[in-house]
Image: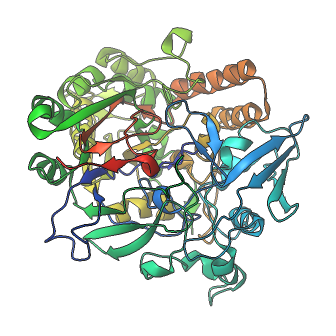
Amino acid sequence: MGLSRWCGLGRRLGAILLVLGLSMGLVGCNLDQFAKADADVPRLVLSTLSDPKTFNPVLSQESPNIFGFTFEGLTGTDGITGDVVPALAESWDISEDGKTLVFTLREGLKWADGEPLTVDDVVFTYDVLFNPDIPSNSRDGFRIGPQGLLPAVSKLDSRRGQFSLPEPFAPMLRNTSQEIIPQHLLQSAVETKGADGKPVFLTTWGTDTPAAQIIGNGPYRLGQYIPGERVIFERNPHYWRRDDQGNPQPYIEQIVWQIVGSTDTAFLQFRSGGLDSIGVQPDFFSLLKREEDRGNFSIKNGGPDLGTSFVFFNLNQASRNGKPLVDPVRSRWFNSVAFRQAVSYGIDRETMINNIFQGLGSPQTSPISVPSPYFAPPEMGIRTYDYNPEKAKELLLGAGFTFNGGGQLFDAEGNRVRFNLITNSGNKIRESIGAQIKNDLEKLGMQVDFQPLAFNALVDRLTDSLEWEACILGLTGGLDPNGGANVWLLDGALHAFNQQAGPGQDPLEGWQAADWEKRVADLYIQAAQEMNDDRRFDLYKETQRLTQEYLPFIYLINNLSLTAVRNTVQGVKYTAIGGAFWNIHELTLKDE
């Protein structure tokens, strides 16, 4: 999962990242804005709220990112069916015992600089991914069994490689969508240590690296990056795909991300005719729907979105350098299951749907995406939290809280219940959700200090300092729940509600996990070991029961997957699984 740390075209469908609300839409041509854009080059221009944070796919924790354009893995995902499909690998074979996966690369693969792409690059990539000195958001999805063992990756010959597993591992094939990186450019950075004793790789291919030095294997290569303004992608002349007539793909020669800073700015650009596509915010839907014919665009509806949205508390009871990460008084509130359940009952999701989402959504009841075959609906006994402030107050009183004559809430020691709630600034929906939650919880006597933060400040608190109290975020989703293993394993890179120290960070003292937390982690391990789909479903159903009972994340709204696309963009096959541009290599542009 990537900070919603973690959709659009760059989504790795088998993984889950934190989504930081980087709204992506295709924007049209304004030659004053794009100094290096050739007026005769067919192009799309995408909008995003924020600058990229890295050009290194192994280190990335954000979505959208550049890698859906610039890199590929051995496999990909069909955006319509969700099936695993060949990418850099033309085929694969899985042994009868499920412990060996042999892949065969396509002939003549090349990097964007023209150098051959070989099995050596694949082995190198996974050596880097599994290197304990290199933090990676993807590694947790490959950990097998209770010991968290990793596959062994080896070269068989010039085109064939092999994954050797300690035991059968159901998500393995889907996991091979991991982006392959070039050994000839990056090996020295992995092997060389800096003055701090860490691999130089950790600072390699940052956003200060010249675009020409970022060499990938995807349909596009990085052409230009101007911080705060734009990212330009150019067609990769060495990309492997060709159509049935032998013509090289992709057809669209250039893609531009314009960094717009806000969803309102992107909306205004789209309405004025400057954008080719935009993610449809709920408050924009009615107006855009009326303008479809005049604006020559169509709103694509993919049904329930893969992602999740939630508010969550910092349950971390550890200290760092002798200082508690969370004030002990507030930590006791947050670690009370009754307190978290009361908060969930106190949030008016129907009003949120009507006022913020304009009716375009439904209450969310699970960490697993609705389109996933492993999603368990409430009808299967999964607990839900309809708005019930009286039930919330009953739970609080039962947990030792009290109300004064003015309706203010105090704990058993007489401390006023007050805490800070943060989210990423620039995301209009999240800011509106935060404002409503603040008002809803005030009716329970709580004082909520709501503060949207700049991206870098938010990431620092959630992943580095670990000093925060409550947060509104979301996660991108996938079809296989194991993509969220990095959220649910106790030492997962995105175990955000109770995060352990990351590589190179000061250690934590007194970190502990609740019994239910350990059980969820164990169930994720067991489900990955289970090859029978029915038994896998039962295991994941139990994880959903536990997460809705104990509420490490208090889920909010599952919105519809909606995107407006100009009718000049041909070949779009829109789904919630793949979005509008999962088949970017096939898309073409026509004149209006």
Task: Tell me the quarter of the picture where residue 418 sits.
Answer: top left
Q: From the viewer's perspective, tell me whether residue 118 is left or right of residue 478.
A: right
Residue 496 image offset from top left, x and y in percent: 52, 49
Which residue corresponds to the image point at 16% horizontal and 69% vertical from the top-left? Answer: 31
Which residue extends farthest front? 245
- Taking depth in this image into account, of 355 and 518 the one nearest to the observer is 355
Residue 528 image offset from top left, x and y in percent: 74, 35
Residue 197 image offset from top left, x and y in percent: 67, 84
Residue 507 image offset from top left, x and y in percent: 63, 66
- Taking depth in this image into account, of 330 and 567 the one nearest to the observer is 567
Which residue corresponds to the image point at 54% horizontal and 72% vertical from the top-left? Answer: 112
* Number of marks in the rendered image: 0
Task: Tell me the quarter of the picture where residue 130 sits.
Answer: bottom right
Q: How is the image coloured?
A: rainbow
Q: From the viewer's perspective, tell me whether residue 377 is left or right of residue 429.
A: right
The reply to whether residue 225 is in sight is yes
Which residue extends farthest right? 97
Which residue extends farthest top? 379
Which residue corresponds to the image point at 16% horizontal and 36% vertical from the top-left? Answer: 284
Q: From the viewer's perspective, tell me whether residue 20 is left or right of residue 30.
A: right
- Taking depth in this image into account, of 223 and 367 the one nearest to the observer is 223
Which residue corresponds to the image point at 50% horizontal and 49% vertical from the top-left? Answer: 17
The reply to whether residue 145 is in sight is no
